[in-house]
Amino acid sequence: MPTDVERIHRVLGRQIRINRTERGWTLRELSEHSGISVSQLSSIERGAHLPSVESLVAVAEALDAKPSAWFQAAGF
C-alpha cells in the first residue's frame, strides 16, 4: 500500500499531465511557460519527483490551475 507521500507524488503528476494534455501542450511547451525543465516536468508527471513549492506554483500558474485542487484530488 503506497504511503501518503507516494500517493501525493503519483496524483500530483497525474493532475499536472491531465491539465497539460487538456491544453494540448507538450512537455516542452509547459517548460517554456513555467520555466521548469522538460526533464524535471517529466519526472514530476511520472510521480518520481515531488516538485518544490516554487515549481508547483509555476506549473499551476502556467496551466491556469490551482494546486489546492490537485491536493484535494489526492485526498488531502
Image: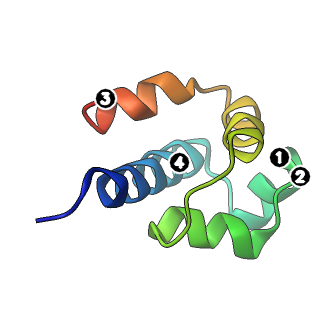
Residue 33 vs 44, above or below: the answer is above
For residue 66, which numbered disc appears in the image?
none
Residue shown at the point (71%, 34%) measured from the top left: 57
Q: Of label 3 and label 2, which has the lower sequence position?
A: 2
- Mark 1: which amino acid? Ser
Residue shown at the point (28%, 50%) measured from the top left: 4
Separation of disc 1 and disc 2 at Cα? 4 Å
Residue 12 vs 40, above or below: the answer is above
Q: Which residue is mark 3?
A: 76
For residue 35, which numbered disc appears in the image?
2
52 to the left or right of 37: left
Q: Which residue is mark 1?
A: 34
Mark 2 burial class by Cα count in 10 Å: few <14, some 14-19, many 20+: few
Q: Which residue is mark 4?
A: 16
- Mark 3: which amino acid? Phe
Task: Pinpoint residue 17: horizontal percent, then vertical percent.
Answer: 51, 54
Q: Of label 3 and label 4, which has the lower sequence position?
A: 4
